[in-house]
Image: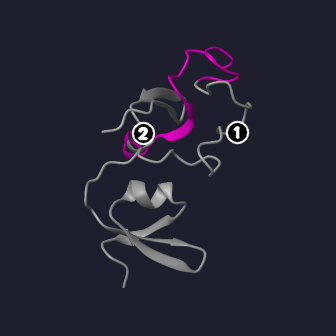
Amino acid sequence: MNYAPVCGERGQSRKTFGNACQARADGYRIVGNGQCSSRPGQGSGPGAGWGGERPGRPPQQGNRPGRPSAGACTREYMPVCARRGNDRQTFSNRCEAERSGYRITGGGQCR
């Protein structure tokens, strides 16, 4: 597992995860890089867990705004079919597809 901590939110609950893939697997939405703070506006940036970036928007990560950084996913092989626009592609796992900006359409390879 790659350690790239993120702050995740589900309903009124915020929790720090070791990486974005873990947060999504537990049903949390990524709200920032780094550890969550106990109150909005506290911690290292404007808004809990934001790490010094603009409030209300996820920080820039690599060359793709709002996407997890490269290496945040495991190498687990559980293929999924995903779509972005008219493009369908098989990915080795859910995290890889989401990291690439694709929406999961089903388990297994695309047909």
Residue 111 on the magenta segment: no
Name above or below for residue 63 compared with residue 105.
Answer: above
The type of colouring in the image is: one colour
Q: Quadrant of residue 20?
A: top left
Q: Kindly report the secondary structure that dominates the magenta region of the rendered protein.
A: loop
Estimate the x, y position of residue 13 in percent, counting from the top left: 50, 28
Q: Residues within 10 Å of mark 1 (few under 14, many from 20)?
A: few
Name above or below for residue 92 compared with residue 41.
Answer: below
Between residues 94 and 61, which one lies in front from this camera angle?
A: 61
Q: Residue at x 61, y 23 (%)?
A: 48
Circle 1 SS class: loop
Question: Does 105 sit left or right of 62 as displayed?
Answer: left
Between residues 27 and 100, which one lies in front from this camera angle?
A: 100
Image quadrant occupied by the N terminus:
top left
Find the distance from the CA under tag 2 to the CA under tag 1.
18 Å
Name above or below for residue 2 compared with residue 16.
Answer: below
Range of the magenta residues?
Answer: 22-48
Circle 2 SS class: helix
Estimate the x, y position of residue 88 in percent, counting from the top left: 48, 78
Between residues 70 and 7, which one lies in front from this camera angle?
A: 70
Q: Which residue is mark 1?
A: 57
Q: Which residue is mark 2?
A: 23
Q: Residues within 10 Å of mark 2 (few under 14, many from 20)?
A: many
Q: Residue at x 51, y 44 (%)?
A: 69
Q: Residue at x 37, y 46 (%)?
A: 25
Residue 36 on the magenta segment: yes
